Each structure stands twice: as structure tokens, then as C-alpha cells.
Image (cartoon, rainbow, N blue to C red):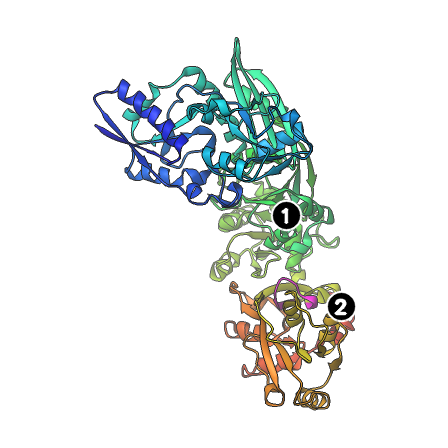
Amino acid sequence: MKYTIGTRGSKLALVQTESVKQALEKAFPMHTFEIKIIKTTGDKNQKDSLYKIGGKGVFVQEIEEQLLNGEIQIAVHSMKDMPSRPAKGCIFTKSPKREDPRDVLVLREKKTLNELKTGATIGTGSIRRKAFLLKLRPDLQIVDIRGNVDTRLRKMEDEKLDGIVLAAAGLKRLGRENEITQYLSYEEMIPSPAQGCLALEINEKNMELKDMLDSLSDEESNACASIEREFLLKLEADCTTPVGAICEKKENGYSLKAAIEKNGTLDEVYVEGDSSTIVDKAMVELNKGKVYLVGAGCGDKDLITVKGLKCIQKADCIIYDRLIDPSLLEEAKAGCDLIYVGKENHNHTMPQAEINHLLVQKAILYHNVVRLKGGDSFVFGRGGEEIEELMKYNIEFEVIPGITSSIAGLTSAGIPITHRDFVSGFRVITAHNKNGNMNHIDFHSIAKGKETVVFLMGLSKLDKIVENLLDAGMSKDMDIAVIGHAYMPDQIVIQGTLENIVERVNEANVTSPGIIALGKTIAFRNKYKKYLVTKVGPYSKLADLLKEKGYQVDEISLGAIKYFDFELKKDYNYIIFTSKNGIEAFFNKDVDVHSSKLIAIGEKSAKYLKEKGYEPYFVSKGNSNELIRDLKSMITEDDSVLYVRAKHVSSNLKEYFNMDEVIVYENEEVKWNDLNVEIYDGIFFTCASSVERFLQKVKVNCPIYSIGPVCSKAIQKYGCIKGIYLGIKRISKCHPFHPGGYDPLP
């Protein structure tokens, strides 16, 4: 039978593949073997850093694709260049005899690292090698260098580098051992896991071929490489998380020396043991970061605690759930590793056991890890299970409590969870067990009690809950409410009694996450008012102002500001600005306007110009007719004028002046989910674009408020709907709102 062996086209890759081909031909003369060169992404892009273009996987993806589609039957790689797992559908066979795993120095003039001058320049594309070099010689200058052995040696000469670091195995296989200047011991530099080993990869369906290749293996080399690779796998590490590991056979087992680079420092460990336990022993002994189990609160980002927010801001890695407000992740620092592990019904991104171990992996790789969970980590949040896994590996942790949905969810609907005149306390119950079945709940004690009762994770079992409560003797007239998506823009509240709640919830098509609450405090909901504020971008000053006044407020973003690149044709005598966004977009680019007179339309534009460090030459406070009159009094026919504007915004100023226009930004519509507007007592609009986007899709019967005449004019286009004009100043002077009492808004 004919077998095709795939490989990269470098000299080293071909030499390695030829050695495998010859071994197969000798062992299996009844078959024929040929070599096929495959060019990978890593070979095509020799310019960019390995970490920038996707890590070690860029050297194998195209080869694995051909294994899977049958174009080749065997792939030969350097094992150290392989990701921690092969592609789905591919497997590694046992390793042939290992070549020298050490790293080596090739120096241009000197003989040892210690002989190099202060500040000498060494080339390497490996963060691991860089960390060890700087441990040995902190004064060295490390430069990034990529390419095959010939390319790196040539760059050393062309760029007059003092030396480069390579793998001994590659130079020896190429017959260039004499070019090695200094071997680096395992104490000086721990090699990459499985360095010096070949990886023979095949399609997992071809078991006959696996037996053939396994016959070429070396028992000790395979055992040591397997342990090193297991260490890599347990960390889920790749070349963006620099790891070193070297395993050696001992008289009564194995030794494993390993290292991880974290933020410029090296964490090293040495352990001995048998093959089944040695990797876990190493992971226990490694220095670890700290894990913070942070409750993100219920729905709204503003409900996170101050301490929880500080943890997010300093985190190196955040592992987060489905029910957090996504805008919390915007608080993370640049480069933070964000990992989603959300769960929805039976559709889990990752099983809980894997999440538990993921926390261990990331605590080894990072100094500060945040486990960000909706609500509170311990209120049915599986935080206890995660802590058990952290304790198993001696990992420091801290729990930052969060505002649980069992309380906040009711508050979002205007329902107090307690009232001393009506209830003696409250119960919080999870409606299902870990297998997804109905929990064993004492419905008789609930029916006889006087507490507010809250069921979490029970929306799919609402009919069973109601049935059991009625069977236990609770009145069919007992008040009950279902709150869906609490403190989220699409929150919905369905209120009723045990007799009709199931029908009402089904009609409204309420979806998870949902909270079920019953008791005498449900009736208080009718005394609260709630408003919706539309906005463009992530922030709304109006929403913050209303919240300060005590109003319940939801926010929905209907647009995002997109900046455009632009070029100025010349120097202008006057530049006219009409909005904050225009000013932000204009000065987002490095422009020189010191020779121009800046005109601000409105006090707000003037304020933003001053914040940018520019004093407006003139501030217009009147209507469009007054603006034109004012401008005519100062701008002559010979003056050049620039009008800074948004896309899709027109002006009649060009009719009066020698004017250029520059489009610097766009209020771009964003996708948003349909809302149940019936839960709101009023809707606020802050700009005409939001009015158009919202009222074209949603029929509104509640009062509508605008904060400007242009916005009010847009509202009035929609027939019988009349916008109530409320300026920001007027709102800011309103008395605080007291639920059930005086409402200062008309």
C-alpha cells in the first residue's frame, strides 16, 4: 500500500520526515512511502511575531486538514511546535527516540553567555527563552527573530546580533552540531515540553497505521514526552503562555522540572513521582495567583459592589457567566484574558467540572483571576464546588459577595421582599436539583407560613410549583409575580394569582432567567413607577440623573458613535462645531487648529471645546436665524470656513458662506431586542435619531418625554403621540421621587 507523508518544506522538517520514511521502509518493505511538502500559514508569514499570527497552531493547521480529508496519511512535526491537543479527528502515535532536548546558544564572536559584553543582543522568538536569558543576564537586549535554522543564522550575521538561541535537536539533525557555541543546562534554561521529540500524527480512524508507527517508538522517550505534554495539557497552555518542562527517567519513577513565565517572572518547580501522579504534584507545587469569586449583581452593571469592580479592573483573567451585564467587561484592563463559560438550561458552554479546573489552570498562569458570576457566588451559584477545587491545589481565593437576584429581582419589579406588617421573613428556594429534576420542597410549610417565598431557576416548573402549592392548601387568590430578565432592558413582570399566573406567563412567553415570588408584599408593586431611557452609546447622563432622584430606570442603547478618518484641505479662518460627538471625533485625530477661530453652537459645545484645551472665539446661543445673523457679522466673503458635522446631518449654512464640510462621525444604529414597553410609566428620548429608531418599531401608550425641541418635533411626527418637553435643568430641579407618593414629573 502507498502512504503519503505530509511535512513543512524547511530543511529540518524534510530531514526529520526523511528519517521517519526510511524507518518505515526498513520495517515495512511491503508498503511504499512518499513525502509531500505542505506550506502552512506560519511558513507564509515570516515577518510577524508568532504570538501575533496565532501561535504554534499556524504551523500545523493545513497539514491536519489534509490528514482529515485523506490527501496524506501521516504527518511529521516537531512535537514542541504542536498545540496541547491535535485537531479533532487526529491523534498522535507513540514517540520515536528523542534527540537532545536542550536549548543551545550560537554566538557570533564569543564562546559563552558570560563572556558577552554588557547589553549584548540575543535573538529569539520565544518568550520562554527570553525569560530564562534575562534571569541569567538581566542586561541582555532580546530581539524577536523567526524563521528556519538557516534564516536565523543568516539574520544573526546580517543584523550583527551577538547570538541566537536554538534547539540542539534541530542543529544535530541537520548535521550542524559544530556550530553550537554553548549548551544550556536544565538549570539554566528548561526546554519547551517534548523538545527533541518527533510527533507522528494520523487520522484517528486509521488504527492499522497507528500500530505500524507505534512499532518505531522508544519507550523512555515516549513516557517522558507524554508526561511533559500532560503538563502542557493540564494548563491548556500554548505558545502565548510560555511553559517549559523536562521529564527524566529515574530509578523509582520520574522527575519533572517545569517553569512558567508570568509577567516577566519565572515560576519553577521540581518534583519526583510515578507517571500517574507527577503532573498533579507539579501543579500543586507551582506558585499560583489568587482567584476572586465575584458576584456581579443582578442584571444592571451598577449593582456590582465597589470591591467587585476593583477586582475586575485589576484582573489578568476573567472567567464569566451568561447573566452578567456585558458592559462590566469593558472595565477590564487591556490584554485581560476573557473566557465565557455561560450556561443556559441544558446548553452549557463548559461542564462545571471543567470550569472548576479552568480556575486552577488560570491561577497557575496569572496573578489575578476573577470568576465573575451573576448575582451572588453562593446563592445557588456553584461557588462552593469551585472553592473545593481551588483548595485541592492550594490556591488562595477570596469571595466578593454580590447582590442576589432573589432580593434585587423583586426590587426591580417594585416588590419589597419584606414588610413587618405583613410577612415574618422570606425563603429562597431553587426549584430544581443538579440533575434538572424538581427539587424536594416542603410545600406544606410554605402554604402555612407567612413569609415571602422566592423560587430561583423555576420558570420551566411554574405549573408544578403552582399545583403543589394549591394541593398543600394555599389559597388560589394568593398574589404571585414572575419577573423575567430582572434589571435588564427587556425585563418583563407578570403579576397575578395562583389561579391565573401560569396562563398569563405562557401568553407573555416569558423566557429564562426568571424569578418567581409569592406573598402579601406582591401587591406593593402597583405603588412604584418605572421609566425607560433611550441612549446612544454606553453612557446616559439623563439615566444617572433620574436614578439619583430615586426613579427606577432601565436603559437601552439604540446607536453607537463611529468615528471617520478625514483630511483637512487647508488652514481655515473659522471652524464651526455643533456637538460633543463632533468635537470628540475631530480632535480624536492629531490636527493643528491654533491658527483658526473656533465657533461653538450651544453652551455644551463650548464646554467640550474648553475641556479639549481650546477657548471658543464665539458661542452661539440662539436659533438658526440668529446663528446666521451672528456669523454674517463676523465672517467675510474672503474667509474660509470649515463646518464639522455628522453623516446624514445637513445644514443651510453653505448657502451663506464660503464653506467646506468634513464628516467626522456617524450615529450608527445598533441591533436591540424587542421590549415589553407596558411595564414602563414613561419613556425618555434624548435625540431625534433614537425617536425614529424606537417609535418605528414599538407602539407606545405611556407618556413620552424629550429633553429638547428637536427631539419633541421628531416625536410629534408619530400622530397622536405628544412629547412632553423636559430639559435637563428642569429634571435636575425636581424633588426626589418617593414610591407611592409625590411624582414630580408631569
Q: What is the quadrant of residue 63 in the picture? A: top left
- Which one is earlier in the sequence, the residue at label 1 or at label 2? 1
Q: Nearer the viewer, residue 50 or 372?
A: 50
Q: Nearer the viewer, residue 279 or 685?
A: 279
**Residue 458: x %, y % from top left:** 53, 48
Q: Nearer the viewer, residue 114 or 485?
A: 114
Secondary-structure class at tag 1: loop
Quick one: label 1, few (<14), some, or many (20+) residues within 10 Å?
A: many
Amino acid type at circle 2 is Gly
- Is residue 532 located in the magenta-colored stretch of the structure? yes
Q: Which residues are magenta?
A: 531-542
Q: Is residue 706 above or below residue 160?
A: below
Q: Nearer the viewer, residue 406 or 689?
A: 689
Left or right placement of residue 48 versus residue 93 in this view? right
Q: Which residue is mark 1?
A: 375
- Is residue 343 located in the magenta-colored stretch of the structure? no
From the image, state whether disc 1 or disc 2 is nearer to you.
2
Task: Count numbered badges in the picture.
Answer: 2
**Which disc number belongs to residue 613?**
2
Left or right placement of residue 36 versus residue 354 in this view? left
